[in-house]
Amino acid sequence: MAVHSERVQTQSPESGKAAVATIETSAARSGGAGTAKKKSARPADGRSIGSRLAPYLLLLPATVATLGLLGWPLLKTVLVSFQNLNARQLVQHLTEWNGFENYTEQLKDEQFWAVTGRSVAFTVLNVFLIMVGGALVGLLLNRLGKKMRLLLSIGLLFAWAMPVVASTTVYTWLFETRFGVVNWLLDALGWHSMAAYNWTGSQYSTFFVILLLLVWGSIPFVAFNMYAALTTIPKELYEAARMDGAGSVKIFTAVMFPNLKPFFLATTFLEVIWIFKAFTQIYAIKAGGPDGLTRTLPIHAFLEGSGRQHYGTGAAIAVLTILILGVLMAYYFRIILKQEDEL
């Protein structure tokens, strides 16, 4: 203790240096505390405001372009749906608002509900066949060797990349009444009554041609997605299932399907939208005929709007089509969001 008291009282150069060092150390500590206080003023995640706003600024040009290209036409369609806009108003540049008259007229029209039911049934059947056929082709791609997989992929790619109008024209030629390849082939196989069969003369035969065209053009998309999803499943899961004695069906239900569930949900969602709004194939083959029996909601909106020059009515049907599709997909979209939260 005596030695300690002497060091405190003695003003030697060494003790002066020690005191200065102590003061500097205290100042550094106090400065560090101040710096820490300044740093604590930042957000909890440690990012500045600029870095947090950067993603939104990068998305801003695409958002503006989307609103300009899609938002404005949609808004214009909604406004027209509340107007009595026919040929006279269009020529004279008149704006006659009629409120919800176009909507109430369609909601009371039996033809509108017949077209709606036909559109829903047509969509369900198409999507079912597309998903089953695409899944089977995707499984085939996963089992083939490299050369055969490449050959099949090229064929699928050509079918997928063919313009819609071109593929519809080819199918029209194939099912032509007098010189179509399909009728010639059926006649050669012994079905002589099909030699001059009119495939677009009845509702169901016309829908068969349209369905075949839509399924043929949509299977490549599902098949490629299916094959890509299959490549993400570890091979160890297959080996473990085979060691447990699982067959092909059990491997698909217990190993593949649980891992492919997000793929099935997302792809089915996209296919429902794609088929429900299909227009070119149906219109190019028979324009909703015969006798309007193959009309779907997009065809009905076009024929009532541009065809009969009742543009307000056509716009109302278009808006109702969007609302009906939204109602049909609301529950399904909820399932997709729930699936993403589980992942």
Image (cartoon, rainbow, N blue to C red):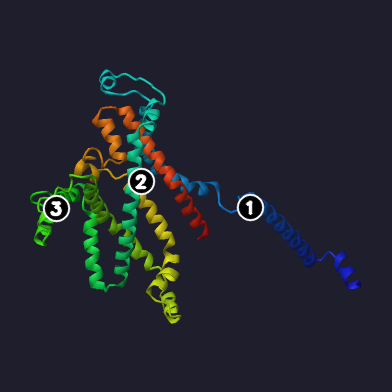
Badge 3 crowding class, 10 Å Cα cut-off, few under 14, some 14 to 19, many 20 or more, is some
Q: What is the quadrant of residue 117 in the picture?
A: top left
Nearest to N terminus: mark 1 or mark 2: 1
Distance of mark 1 from mark 3, alpha carbons?
73 Å
Distance of mark 2 from mark 3, alpha carbons?
27 Å
Which residue is disc 3 drawn over? 174
Q: Secondary structure at mark 3?
A: helix
Q: Nearer the viewer, mark 2 or mark 3?
A: 2
Instruction: Compare residues 183 and 53 and report the one nearer the observer.
Output: 183
Taking the spot 89% from the left edge, 68% from the top edge, the residue there is: 5
Instruction: Compare residues 248 and 152 and report the one nearer the observer.
Output: 248
Amino acid type indicated by mark 1:
Lys
Badge 2 crowding class, 10 Å Cα cut-off, few under 14, some 14 to 19, many 20 or more, is some
Residue 64 point in image, percent of width and height: 40, 39
Left/right of residue 211 with respect to residue 1 in the rendered view: left
Taking the spot 56% from the left edge, 52% from the top edge, the residue there is: 47
Q: On screen, 107 above or below 226?
A: above
Which residue is disc 2 drawn over? 120
Instruction: Compare residues 17 and 151 and report the one nearer the observer.
Output: 151
Distance of mark 1 from mark 2, alpha carbons?
59 Å
Q: Secondary structure at mark 2?
A: helix
Amino acid type indicated by mark 2:
Val
Residue 39 shows which numbered tag?
1
